[in-house]
Image (spheres, rainbow, N blue to C red):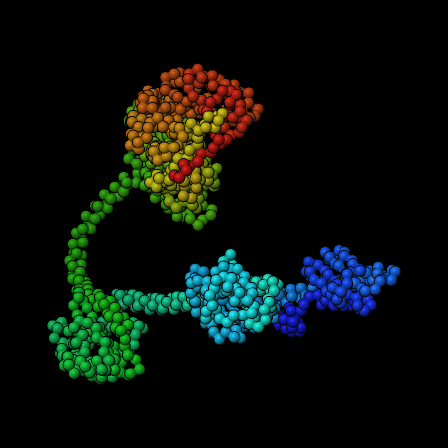
């Protein structure tokens, strides 16, 4: 905190404040008069912004007229005048000399006054700055509020007369005020800082000040008279000078500071008003900071209390969870005892150990009703006072009381005495200070009691112990029943073993008779096994035997880095043609001959198997590398290629062979056969009559296709396929006339997929039709939900849809069900679709055309481009393939221009709309406009996007 002002400024602030300016100028006329003869008079006048106006006179001015007079404008805005009179004539030259000296002296006096005024202003500014620093320091201090306000009072007293001083706070919302601080030398009223006083009318100067926010200065009686405030006790004693300034925040009055003087009027100047206003705002800031810190501390305390409560609750919850975990472990152990205890005595002892972990159980016993219900037996008892508990007839003990009531009993010595006094119980054995017993139940029937007791007074059982033991007893009863049932089962098992032993001797005699029958059956089984392991037509091993040999080979090779074997999967080329042309009997002869040739081409240890149909496989072990497997394949193909005469016909068989080489990733023979089959199809695709080695690329493609098909089936169920819309626009204006619905897949791992990334899998698996219909249904729903979607929507239709006779009817039914006009739909087809099944395609397109669904021909110019189908089929639009549009920029621009010009001429002559696909640049658009193209589609106008809000 800064040093006190009094120590820094030893001169009295009040004396400095009331020091009259012009002390130098006040005696100036007298000093000038002394330089003139007796009887002379002198008058000095001045006017300056900082000093104001003033005059000083010496001598009798009225005695004679002025004989000398001089007025001029000095520096710093001075206006000065000197006038002097003398009864005698002035000697020559003396008058000018005297006026010159007087002028110089007067200017020096004014400069001294200005310097003194500046010093006074600087001192007051320094005092104000120090005061504001101290107030700011007080706001951040830890002083109590009364102490802080007394320090503020002392600071204000250093700046001005402030023996009578108070601070009042105002709440405009509640229309109340609080006198936060009040010190007065005459007024005996004592303030309560917490008391809120209603502000009803302007019946006091303080209320007037708070409600108006205007600074009030002057004698209090005159102020009351000016504002029409009647005298009263609420006003307090009248003061000779009263000064009050408002504390405001955001143009809202929050309080006021008031000083007053009861003895001397005109004590407070305009400078004091300004100074007090500065102080008032800093005092308000200090109070607000104090209040904010108080609220923050309250919130911190409240939050701390909440955290403490939460911590206590959490601690209690942790304790309770630990207790529940202990109980759960105990219940698991109890349930386990019924299975692992080798005797009932061991079972009861383990139960005692478990209960001892949960509560005080030094004295513990289990009482059970006898089979006839007339005796009370104690199969287990551990007690420091009663080491032996003998069975007894049912009586009136505490144990019998629990048996009769079927409810737990928690009793101390007094409770036991009350029960005895009522005649309901009678104690047996040593007297317990605290006793707790709970019933053992089986099928809601009381069969016994578990009891714990304590003979000392240092520990008494409570309600929680009762609840815990009751809960545990329920599980003990169940486990006891299981244990008893298990013991009975053991006895029954022993009896059963004896009977089995007797029966075994009888069966041994019958076994001799069965040996001969078994031998005969084994011979039949061997025959059946051979039939099960070999192909009936060729006599070669079948698929089952091959897989068995493959399993042994994989097991032997697992962990052996030098192991090398291969599976060759072969399929006779065009074998179906043989069956269809010359019959299955000839085909069977060809298969037998093919098997014979294959066996003749392989090594002695190789396994040749027929898998079914025209498929054969070879397991070749002990290879030196993949080259050896390929050599074997070529040898087999060479043997098969020789001509063969079957049923009087000369045939030239050939085959396609796929080879799968052993790799540690294989876990079964089926996997190797699968990969060899995939390689065989690669060989057929490459032209037949050749070998193909399965490689990692095939593996990745197969895995990808399999995974993609699986994901695709899940996506169909989850409806993860969605349409993206790319507008078809007028090429000159960009106005949308329609949309093309493009298929997108929201894949769970790979994100958004375009058709090119999954269409081949969909085509191969046949799932593409389901996906298309999901897309068509979604598009029609989008049209129904968004009638503002501009123009028509074109959907892509593959040739396979036109093979279905109900395609057009099904599509129209979807639109009718959704309430969508068929004119809003268009189908987009390729040239292949037109030529695949022309009559059926024409029938479907005609039906759609009759209902308003037009057809667009996609990728025009890249296929057959026959003019005949443009006349035969109802085609409404041609779409110029994007390859021609892209060719408008490059070396082949002239060729693309020629093709597009021809297409435009063709479409114009036939009255067919023309749409350019793949427009991506302004140059392409401008060239297309020049060539006469009307509509366009491409990234220049918009990429495919999902429907807004979908």
Q: Is residue 829 left or right of residue 370?
A: right
Quarter of the image where the C terminus is located:
top left
Q: Residue 451: x and y, percent?
A: 23, 76
Q: Residue 140: x and y, percent?
A: 55, 67
Viewer-side residue, 427 vs 264: 264
Q: Is residue 557 above or below residue 614?
A: below
The reply to whether residue 225 is visible in this rendering is yes
Viewer-side residue, 181 vs 209: 209
Residue in the picture at 60% in, 62% down: 270
Residue in the picture at 27% in, 68% down: 334
Residue 391 image-quadrant placement: bottom left
Viewer-side residue, 252 vs 465: 252
Residue 410 image-quadrant placement: bottom left
Viewer-side residue, 544 vs 475: 475
Count of numbered tags: 0
Q: Residue 835: x and y, percent?
A: 38, 21
The reply to whether residue 137 is visible in this rendering is no
Q: Is residue 39 above or below residue 47?
A: below
Q: Residue 821: x and y, percent?
A: 33, 28
Residue in the picture at 33% in, 27% down: 822
Quarter of the image where the N terminus is located:
bottom right
Residue 365 image-quadrant placement: bottom left
Q: Is residue 875 left or right of residue 244?
A: left
Residue in the picture at 32% in, 32% down: 613
Q: Is residue 204 above or below residue 691?
A: below
Residue lying furthest right in this view?
92
């Amino acid at each position: 905190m800064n040093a006190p002002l009094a120590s820094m400024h030893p001169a009295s602030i009040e004396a400095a404040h009331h020091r009259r300016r012009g002390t130098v100028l006040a005696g100036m006329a007298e000093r000038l008069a002394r330089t003139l003869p007796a009887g002379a008079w002198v008058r000095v006048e001045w006017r300056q912004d900082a000093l104001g106006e003033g005059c000083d006179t010496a001598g009798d001015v009225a005695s004679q007229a002025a004989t000398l007079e001089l007025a001029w404008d000095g520096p710093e805005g001075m206006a000065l005048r000197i006038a002097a009179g003398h009864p005698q004539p002035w000697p020559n030259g003396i008058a000018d000399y005297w006026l010159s000296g007087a002028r110089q002296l007067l200017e020096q006096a004014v400069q001294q006054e200005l310097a003194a005024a500046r010093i006074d202003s600087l001192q007051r500014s320094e005092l104000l700055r120090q005061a504001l620093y101290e107030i700011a320091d007080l706001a951040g201090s830890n002083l109590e509020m009364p102490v802080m306000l007394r320090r503020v009072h002392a600071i204000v007293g250093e700046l001005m007369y402030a023996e009578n001083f108070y601070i009042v706070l105002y709440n405009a919302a509640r229309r109340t005020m609080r006198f936060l601080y009040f010190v007065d030398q005459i007024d005996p009223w004592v303030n309560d800082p917490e008391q809120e006083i209603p502000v009803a009318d302007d019946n006091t100067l303080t209320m007037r000040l708070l409600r108006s926010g205007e600074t009030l200065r002057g004698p209090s009686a005159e102020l009351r008279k000016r504002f029409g405030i009647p005298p009263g006790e609420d006003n307090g004693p009248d003061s000779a000078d009263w000064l009050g300034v408002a504390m405001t925040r955001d143009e809202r009055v929050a309080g006021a500071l008031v000083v007053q003087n009861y003895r001397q009027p005109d004590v407070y100047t305009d400078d004091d008003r300004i100074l007090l206003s500065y102080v008032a705002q800093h005092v308000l800031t200090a109070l607000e900071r104090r209040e904010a810190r108080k609220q923050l501390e309250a919130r911190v305390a409240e939050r701390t209390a909440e955290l403490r409560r939460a911590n206590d609750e959490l601690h209690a919850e942790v304790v309770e969870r630990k207790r529940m975990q202990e109980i759960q472990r105990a219940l698991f152990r109890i349930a386990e005892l019924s299975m692992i205890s080798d005797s009932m005595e061991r079972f009861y002892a383990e139960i005692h150990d478990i209960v001892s972990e949960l509560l005080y159980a030094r004295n513990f016993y289990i009482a059970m009703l006898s089979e006839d219900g007339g005796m009370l037996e104690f199969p287990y008892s551990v007690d420091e006072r009663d080491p032996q508990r003998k069975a007894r007839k049912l009586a009136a003990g505490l144990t019998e009381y629990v048996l009769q009531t079927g409810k737990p009993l928690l009793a101390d010595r007094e409770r036991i005495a009350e029960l005895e006094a009522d005649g309901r119980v009678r104690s047996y054995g040593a007297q317990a200070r605290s006793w707790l017993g709970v019933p053992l139940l089986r099928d809601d029937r009381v069969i016994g009691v578990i009891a714990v007791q304590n003979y000392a007074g240092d520990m008494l059982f409570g309600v929680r112990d009762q609840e815990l033991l009751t809960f545990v007893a329920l599980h003990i009863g169940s486990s006891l029943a299981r244990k008893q049932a298990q013991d009975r089962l053991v006895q029954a098992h022993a009896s059963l073993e004896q009977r089995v032993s007797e029966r075994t001797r009888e069966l041994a005699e019958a076994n001799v008779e069965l040996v001969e029958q078994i031998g005969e059956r084994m011979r039949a089984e061997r025959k059946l096994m051979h039939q099960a392991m070999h192909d009936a037509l060729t006599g070669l091993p079948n698929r089952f035997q091959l897989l068995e040999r493959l399993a042994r080979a994989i097991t032997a090779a697992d962990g052996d880095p030098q192991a090398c074997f291969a599976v060759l999967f072969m399929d006779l080329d065009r074998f179906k043609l043989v069956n269809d042309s010359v019959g299955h009997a000839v085909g069977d002869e060809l298969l037998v001959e093919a098997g014979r040739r294959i066996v003749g081409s392989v090594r002695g240890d190789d396994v040749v198997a027929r898998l079914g149909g025209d498929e054969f496989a070879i397991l070749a072990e002990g290879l030196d590398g993949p080259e050896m497997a390929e050599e074997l394949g070529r040898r087999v193909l060479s043997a098969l290629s020789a001509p063969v005469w079957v049923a009087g016909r000369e045939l030239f068989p050939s085959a396609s062979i796929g080879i799968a080489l052993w790799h540690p990733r294989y876990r079964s023979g089926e996997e190797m056969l699968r990969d060899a089959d995939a390689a065989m199809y690669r060989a057929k695709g490459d032209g037949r009559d050749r070998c193909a080695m399965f490689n990692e690329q095939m593996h990745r493609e197969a895995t990808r296709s399999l995974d993609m098909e699986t994901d695709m089936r899940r996506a169909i169920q989850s409806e993860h396929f969605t349409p993206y819309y790319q507008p078809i626009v007028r090429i000159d204006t960009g106005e949308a006339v329609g949309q093309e619905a493009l298929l997108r897949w929201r894949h769970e791992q790979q994100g958004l997929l375009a058709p090119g990334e999954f269409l081949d899998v969909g085509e191969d698996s046949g799932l593409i039709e389901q996906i298309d219909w999901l897309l068509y249904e979604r598009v029609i729903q989008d049209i129904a939900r968004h009638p503002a979607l501009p123009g028509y929507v074109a959907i892509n239709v593959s040739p396979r849809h036109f093979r279905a006779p109900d395609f057009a009817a099904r599509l129209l039914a979807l639109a009718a069900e959704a309430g969508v006009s068929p004119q809003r739909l268009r189908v987009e087809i390729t040239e292949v679709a037109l030529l695949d099944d022309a009559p059926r395609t024409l029938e479907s397109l005609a039906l759609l055309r009759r209902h308003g669904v037009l057809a667009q021909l996609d990728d025009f110019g890249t296929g057959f481009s026959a003019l005949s189908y443009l006349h035969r089929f109802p085609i409404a639009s041609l779409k110029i393939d994007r390859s021609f549009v892209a060719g408008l920029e490059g070396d082949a621009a002239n060729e693309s221009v020629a093709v597009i010009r021809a297409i435009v001429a063709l479409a114009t002559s036939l009255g067919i709309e023309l749409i350019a696909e793949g427009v991506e640049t302004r140059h392409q658009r401008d060239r297309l406009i020049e060539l006469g193209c009307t509509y366009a589609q491409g990234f220049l106008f918009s990429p495919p996007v999902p429907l807004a809000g979908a």
